[in-house]
Amino acid sequence: MSDATLTIFYDGKCPLCTMEMQKLKGYDTKNLIILENLHQENFESLFPHISIDKAMDMLHGQYKGKILLALDVTHRAWTLVGRGALVAPLQLPVVKQVAHLGYLFLAKYRQPISNCMYERFGIGIKPCEEGTCYDKPNNTHRRG
């Protein structure tokens, strides 16, 4: 792992989260993003500095030795893969505050939102009874 990589700690049982991580990895031609599923068996021993409970409430990332949270993770990730223009407005002061409130709502209700988006519109990844179905994991960790 180089200093230029971003490690994202994400909810691998969330279809919406997994879909975004797969899309992100699709653009990651330089392998600058490392995805770590919060539900992998040895997560706590591998990453004792990351609280699973806090990371389940708000997206966590690690970049250049610093912990990033929520939309700062999203902004850094999409910037690293060359899509920073899409998320640049998230850094504008007023937009950042409003977007953060929206993010907190989405994070809190991500499971029912994911299920609804898939069932009604076919958007996302089909939810399974025990988490996410992995058709194309794109270097995401799976719990076996």
Image: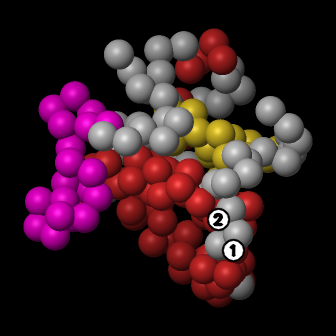
Does residue 118 appear in this view?
yes
- Label 2, secondary structure: give it: helix
Cα–Cα span, label 2 and label 1: 5 Å
- Place of residue 114 in the rendered image (x, y in percent of width and height, measured from the top left): 26, 56
Q: In front: 97, or 5?
A: 5
* Left or right position of 73 against 122: right
Question: Which quarter of the figure has residue 13?
Answer: top left
Residue occupied by mark 2: 78
Question: For the point 88% across and 42% down, which residue is it?
Answer: 3
- Place of residue 124 in the rendered image (x, y in percent of width and height, measured from the top left): 29, 58
- Label 1, secondary structure: give it: helix
* Left or right position of 56 against 79: left
Question: For the point 35% across and 16% down, which residue is it?
Answer: 144
Question: Which quarter of the figure has residue 137?
Answer: top left
Q: From this viewpoint, which residue is outermost toward the front?
A: 29
> Above or below — where is 44 with respect to 138?
above
Whether the magenta-drawn stretch holds residue 5 is answered as: no
Whether the magenta-drawn stretch holds residue 115 is answered as: yes
- Place of residue 141 in the rendered image (x, y in percent of width and height, measured from the top left): 48, 29
Q: Amino acid at mark 2?
A: Trp
- Place of residue 57 in the rendered image (x, y in percent of width and height, measured from the top left): 48, 45
Q: Residues within 10 Å of mark 2 (few under 14, many from 20)?
A: many
> Above or below — where is 28 with respect to 117?
above
> Above or below — where is 94 with respect to 39?
below
Residue occupied by mark 1: 84
Question: For the point 46% across and 50% down, which residue is it?
Answer: 22
- Mark with earlier residue (2, 1): 2
Query: Are the residues at dot 2 and dot 1 in contact (C-beta closer than 8 Å)?
Result: yes
Which region shows up in magenta? 114-134
Q: Residues within 10 Å of mark 1 (few under 14, many from 20)?
A: some
